[in-house]
Amino acid sequence: NNVAIVRVEQIAPFPFDLVAEELSRYPNADTVWCQEEPKNNGSWFYVGPRFDTVYNKVGVNRRTVYAGRKPSAAPATGSPINHKAE
């Protein structure tokens, strides 16, 4: 009852109105962007500022935080042990 998972299917063009509508349903929620790719290989650096724009538009003072793998030069570690740890 405490967690809502919302999936953003299309990020370009960014669906500002749909994201704003969904975020308004959870006014007290923390927002977390989660992705499988390393931080520098996924969508985080594209969507992060756009979430900030949505918050400004709806008058909410919060930020989206990133939850995922740390930045990496490769999308996979190349080591089964490291891969399992991630």
Image (cartoon, helix red, strand yellow):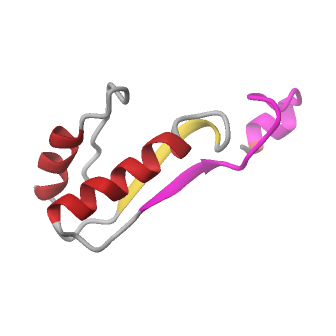
Residue 72 pos. (x, y %): 79, 40
Q: Is residue 37 above or below residue 28?
A: above
Give residue 63's quadrant in the image: bottom left
Q: Is residue 81 above or below residue 54?
A: above
Q: Total label count?
A: 0
Q: Is residue 48 left or right of residue 5?
A: right
Is residue 57 visible in this depiction of the protein? yes
The quadrant the C terminus occupies is top right
* Residue under the point 74% across and 28% down: 75
Is residue 1 visible in this depiction of the protein? no
* Residue 66 painted magenta: yes
Residue 15 pos. (x, y %): 24, 34
The quadrant the N terminus occupies is bottom left
Residue 76 pos. (x, y %): 77, 28
* Residue 41 painted magenta: no
Give residue 81's quadrant in the image: top right
Residue 55 pos. (x, y %): 26, 61
* Residue under the point 27% across and 41% down: 6
Q: Is residue 73 above or below residue 47?
A: above
Q: Is residue 51 left or right of residue 1?
A: right
Give, as a single range, the part of the protein colored magenta: 64-84
* Residue under the point 43% across and 52% down: 49
